[in-house]
Image: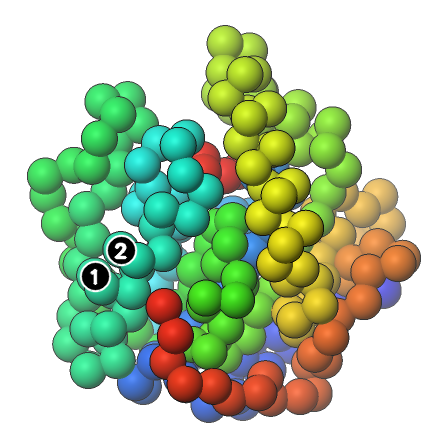
Amino acid sequence: MKGTYRALAGTVLERPPRVGAVRVVAVDGRAGAGKTTFAGRLARELGRTRRVSVLHTDDLLDGWAKLLAWQPRMREWVLEPLRRGEAGAYRRYDWGRGRLGDEWTPVEPPDVLVVEGVGSASAAMRADLTLAVLVGAPRELRLGRGLERDGEALRGEWERWMAAEDGHFAEDRPELAVDVLVDGASAEAHDPEIEYIIGPSGWTAHATLGDDPESGSDGEERSG
């Protein structure tokens, strides 16, 4: 079944913001699943009528060491300032030098903040999310995409990272909490610039696009 970025953008804008006046959209999934592409296309559609920022969790990591190292930084540096109506800022991880950069990248309060990366729809994030997406693809395809981008020399890092992902997703089960599941490897005919394929047979989303996710109190990869 197909969905369109325009309809999904409409759903985002129909729902209330949860971080001050900002609607936060998570695009979660394992490395190499197609999250970055999906997030970019959704942001482009949202950007037709709203101010949109995209934040990649890779930029707030500590290299390959810890899957969710970005979460406390995201909360302290970006989400809490936005909640107060102030600009956030973050230091981008330099993968070549192996450390956080010295310069701060500003995040002016947008109408919609799209957060792309592994764990972006995890339990620690859900109270702040207006909408959550989970993108999936087969393991070998994801690994192949990663090695094509990063080189065969990083196969070991990729395999360790993917094992950590398996542990995280087995425990967190985001597929039971997100609003829409996306097939990042479908062969079904569609126009990828404006359409996406809803998740493969056997995936079920706990929430639906017609539901407002249950409210809660404010809580707390290199991925492809």
Query: What residue is disc 1 on?
Result: 77
Q: Which residue is mark 2?
A: 73
Taking depth in this image into account, of 171 and 142 the one nearest to the observer is 171
Give the image quarter of residue 24. bottom left
- Label 2 crowd bin: few (<14), some (14–19), many (20+), radius 10 Å: some
Please report the residue visible at 73 percent of the width from the left and 42 percent of the height from the top: 137
- Asked which secondary structure carries label 2, the reply is helix
100 in relation to 175, above or below? above
Establish if 145 lies above or below 124: above
- At 71% from the left edge and 58% from the top edge, which residue is drawn? 182
User: Left or right of 207: which side holds 47?
Assistant: left
Residue 54 falls left or right of residue 199: left
- Residue at x 75%, y 52% (from the top left corner): 183
Q: Residue at x 39, y 32 (%)?
A: 65
User: Do the residues under discs 1 and 2 have CB atoms within 8 angstroms?
Assistant: yes
Q: Position of residue 39 (x, y in %)?
A: 52, 56
Marker disc for residue 131: none
User: Label 1 vs label 2: CA separation?
Assistant: 6 Å
Identify the amino acid type marked 1.
Trp
Tell me where residue 114 sits by quadrant. bottom left
Q: Is residue 72 left or right of residue 128?
A: left
Farthest residue to the right: give it: 201
Q: Residue furthest top?
A: 153
| SS under mark 1 | helix
Q: Is residue 38 visible?
A: no
Mark 1 Cα shell of 10 Å, populated few (<14), some (14-19), many (≥20): some
Query: Looking at the picture, how far across and down is residue 22, in whole percent?
Result: 34, 80
Between residue 167 and residue 80, name the one nearer to us. Answer: 167
Residue 164 position in % (x across, y down): 56, 37
| Callout 2 amino acid | Arg
Q: Nearer the viewer, residue 206 or 138?
A: 206
Question: Which color mode does the image show?
Answer: rainbow
